[in-house]
Image (cartoon, rainbow, N blue to C red):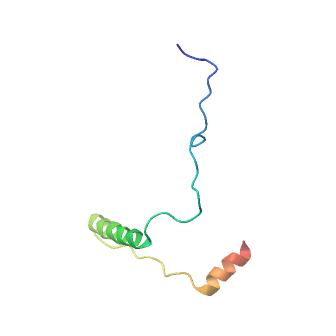
Amino acid sequence: MIDEEFVPPDRGDEQEGPESAVPAGDPDEAVRLFHHYRRLMAQILGYEEELPEPASEEGLAAVEEEL
């Protein structure tokens, strides 16, 4: 039997959110996995993509000022 008036709930409405804003996971493991991913991509592509330099303190301050 099909209920013509049934409306499914929005995704996640029935799930509890996180209890705190603490980041999940281990940062060291994230770094390890990121480097592993980069090695695999270099093998697939045949070259290693160059990452941009980290943002400077001045650059970060300028962007924060714009926000």
| Residue 59 location (% of width, % of height) | 62, 82
Give the vertical position of 65 relative to 22 (above or below). Answer: below
| Residue 33 location (% of width, % of height) | 36, 67
The answer to which quarter of the image holds residue 38 is bottom left
Q: Is residue 66 left or right of residue 2?
A: right
Which residue is the extreme one toward the front?
19
Give the vertical position of 7 relative to 55 (above or below). Answer: above
The answer to which of 52 and 54 lies nearer the viewer is: 54
Residue in the picture at 72% in, 71% down: 67
Q: Is residue 65 left or right of residue 7?
A: right
The answer to which of 14 and 30 lies nearer the viewer is: 14
The answer to which quarter of the image holds residue 26 is bottom left
| Residue 44 location (% of width, % of height) | 28, 63
Residue in the picture at 49% in, 63% down: 24
Residue in the picture at 68% in, 81% down: 62
Give the vertical position of 48 relative to 7 (above or below). Answer: below
